[in-house]
Each structure stands twice: as C-alpha cells, then as structure tokens.
C-alpha cells in the first residue's frame, strides 16, 4: 500500500489496434468506433479511482500523414512538413478522437466534474540524443505496405528508405532513437494530480534534441511508443504501466508449435528471454524492454495484455506481468 494520499496512477499505452483493427480501411467512422471501444475500457479503470495517463502508438498514422503530404506536393506543389511535425499532427489527430470519446463516455456516466475534472491531450516533445546510433540505422516501420516496385519508385522520388516487412510487402522505415524524457512532464504530472485524464506522449513523443544553444529542435524520427511510455511512467512514479496490444500475452517461441504463453516474468527472466531473442524487435521486444525498465526504475508492475482484457490485466488476472526480482 502507498503511504501518501495520492491515488494510484496508471500509464496506459494503447497499441495500433486501439484505432485501426484488422480488416479496417481506416475510415473516420472506424477510427471513432475504435476510439469509443478503447474509451469504454479506460473509463472502467477510471471508475476504480485510478489516476490515468494514456499514450498511444502512431506508426500507421504518421506514415499516412507523410503520404498525404507527398500527394499534395505532387498535385498542387504544397511543400511537405518534416516528420516531427507529422508526429505532432498524429498526436492532435488521435488525441482529439480519444479525448472526445472519453469525454462523452464520462459525461454519459455522470463522472465528469465529479470523479474526473476533464480530459486533456498534451502535445508532447520527447528528448532524444542527437548522436543516438539509431539515426544511422532506420528500423521503425511507418505507413502503409507496398509492392517492391512501388517502394522502389517512391524511394527514388522522395528519398524514403524501404525495408521488407516481416508481415509481407515493403514499408518505409525511419530512425527510432531511445527516448530520454518528456519536456512537458511537469505539466502532465500537475494535470493528473489535479484530477484530469491526460493523453500524452502520443507516438512515443515528438522527437526533439537540445542543441548546443540549449534550445529544442525537432528531428526526423519516430520514437517507439512503449519506450516513451516507460519514460513517462517512471517520471510520474506511476504504480502500473499497462501495455495494451493485440495479443493476450508475451510468448516464448512465438509463432512456432512450441509457443508458450508467459503469465509472470521477474525482471531477470524477462531480460534473459529478451537476450535470447524471444521478443521480436519493433513489436514485442520494446514492450518487454519498457516493462523491465519501468520495474527497474521503481515501478511495481508492468503488464502486457490484449486491449479487451485491460481491466483483468490491471487486477493481475490476464496478460504477462513483469515484476521485480
Ligand atoms: P502494438 O501496435 O500494440 O504496439 P505491435 O505489432 O508492435 O503492436 O506488437 C504486437 C505484436 O507483437 C503481436 O501482434 C505479435 O505479432 C508480435 N510478437 C512478436 N514477438 C512476440 C512474442 N514473443 N509474443 C507475443 N507477440 C509477439
Ligand atoms: Mg508496436
């Protein structure tokens, strides 16, 4: 039990399936439907009197924004914006939808103004190291999938880098530097303490570095949202980091006949399996790493679970829990 009067705080990291599920075309209607489903699950946790901070991925959306801009460039000679600005747009896009869905769900249940003061999205800048080796080796998949010839054409036209995606086809890849911390963390903390539900650090945060002039500058990259969520959860001294995705648990030997679901992982076991390569880079890998770092930094528990099992996962009855040694 905690000794201070502050309610338990949880940081919820929403995966791509919170906005776009399998088979979706990506219409606004589908985004709204998915946002309301996620909001419903989040409100159940709010009703348990947790302080809630929500973050979300933006891989598909930041890539889609870049595509929209590249089409505008071709058709009307409208200059495109760089990737950090696209990241900010994705925070506004998804933040807005989730913010309205949460507001309406809370209003329906008459929880607004009583249990919760309001819902607010914070455009969040996340510091990275300008010399992070990740800038030399782009690994983060963004945007839609292409056939090889289309990818080659776009690569020539726009200078984008493409790699084959393990799920098939080709996808644009960009640098994904390790997050150091959120510039707006004090604002986020104050809002949670004051009783607001905060949506922050979308897409892992807009990557920025501090220049020799001491000032902030955006960089062309996309941070991993799970690693960004860990930085935020640790800085907030959150009690639980809840990573919600489209699988029920992390598995050993994932995708093989010997696949074994994991219920609980001590930090040292998680690291051992991580080093053995059980958790794929760019998907389950960063979730495990985020969970390990969170617990190493003093968090009680990180849970990786299916979005639909958010409530049970928080209560320790679903998902894969990462706990101290
Ligand atoms: P999100 O948008 O939620 O971050 P990701 O696609 O990045 O989703 O990560 C979830 C995916 O990780 C799962 O759909 C699964 O295909 C993949 N994955 C890779 N390794 C594992 C593993 N060891 N156990 C479970 N899932 C894994
Ligand atoms: Mg992911």
Image (cartoon, rainbow, N blue to C red):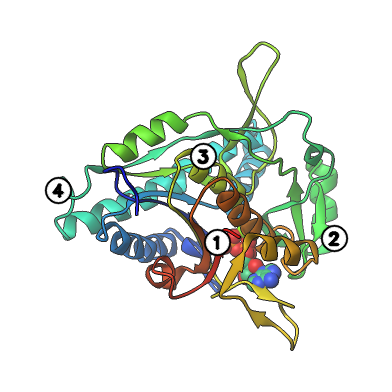
What label does residue 149 carry, if any?
2
Q: Quadrant of ligand 1?
A: bottom right
User: How far apart, in angstroms, are the residues tagged by discs 1 and 4?
Assistant: 33 Å
**Residue tagged by mark 1?**
323
Q: Which badge, 3 or 2, comes first in the chain's sequence?
A: 3
Q: Secondary structure at mark 1?
A: strand
Q: Which image quadrant: the C terminus?
A: bottom right
Is residue 185 visible to the viewer in this orientation of the structure?
yes
Would you say residue 58 is visible in this rendering? no
Residue placed furthest toward the bottom: 257
Q: For the residues marked 3 and 2, what is the alpha-carbon distance in whole angstroms?
A: 29 Å
Nearer the observer, 13 or 314 = 314
Between disc 3 and disc 1, whose residue precedes?
3
Q: Please state which of residues 106 and 60 is positioned toward the viewer in this rendering.
A: 106
Mark 1 in CB contact with mark 2 (< 8 angstroms): no
**Residue 219 percent across, percent down from the top left:** 68, 31
Residue lying at 84% horizontally and 39% vertically, measured from the top left: 136
Q: Nearer the viewer, mark 3 or mark 2?
A: 3
Q: Of the two numbered discs 2 and 4 on the same chain, state the one appearing first in sequence.
A: 4
Q: CA distance from mark 1 to mark 2?
A: 46 Å
Disc 1 crowd rating (10 Å Cα; few below 14, some 14-19, many 20+) is many
Question: Is residue 127 depicted above or below 275 in this figure?
Answer: above
Residue that numbered label 4 is attached to: 114
Between circles 1 and 2, the one closer to the viewer is 1
Look at the numbered disc 3 and say if its residue's Cβ is closer than 8 Å to ligand 1: no
Say which label, 1 or 2, has the lower sequence index: 2
Is 174 above or below relative to 190?
Answer: below
Q: Which residue does the image show at 24% across and 59% down from the upper left?
A: 105
Secondary structure at badge 3 equals: helix
Of tags 1 and 4, the one toward the viewer is 1
| Residue carrying label 3 | 89
């Amino acid at each position: 039990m905690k000794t201070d009067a502050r309610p338990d705080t949880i940081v919820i990291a929403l995966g791509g399936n919170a906005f776009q599920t399998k088979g979706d075309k990506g219409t606004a209607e589908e985004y709204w439907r998915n946002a309301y489903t996620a909001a419903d699950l989040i409100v159940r946790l709010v009703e348990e009197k947790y302080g809630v901070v929500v973050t979300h991925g933006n891989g598909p959306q930041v890539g889609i924004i870049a595509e929209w801009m590249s089409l505008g460039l071709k058709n009307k000679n409208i200059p495109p914006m760089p990737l950090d600005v696209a990241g900010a747009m994705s925070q506004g896009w998804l933040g807005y939808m989730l913010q309205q869905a949460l507001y309406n769900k809370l209003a329906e249940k008459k929880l607004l103004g009583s249990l919760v003061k309001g819902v607010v999205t914070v455009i969040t800048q996340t510091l990275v190291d300008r010399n992070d080796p990740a800038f030399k080796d782009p690994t983060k998949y963004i945007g839609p999938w292409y056939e090889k010839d289309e990818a080659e054409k776009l690569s020539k036209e726009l200078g984008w880098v493409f790699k084959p995606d393990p799920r098939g086809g080709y996808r644009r890849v960009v640098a994904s530097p390790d997050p150091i911390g959120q510039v707006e963390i004090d604002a986020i903390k104050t809002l949670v303490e004051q009783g607001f539900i905060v949506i922050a650090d979308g897409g892992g945060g807009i990557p920025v570095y501090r220049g020799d002039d001491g000032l902030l500058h955006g960089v062309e990259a996309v941070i991993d949202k799970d690693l960004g969520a860990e930085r935020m959860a640790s800085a907030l001294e959150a009690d639980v980091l809840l990573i919600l995705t489209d699988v029920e648990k992390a598995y050993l030997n994932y995708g093989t006949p010997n696949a074994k679901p994991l219920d609980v992982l001590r930090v040292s076991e998680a690291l051992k399996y991580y080093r053995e390569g059980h958790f794929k880079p760019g998907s389950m890998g960063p979730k495990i790493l985020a969970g390990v770092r969170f617990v190493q930094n003093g968090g009680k528990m990180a849970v990786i679970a299916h979005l639909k099992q958010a409530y049970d996962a928080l209560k320790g009855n679903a998902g894969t829990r990462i706990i101290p040694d």
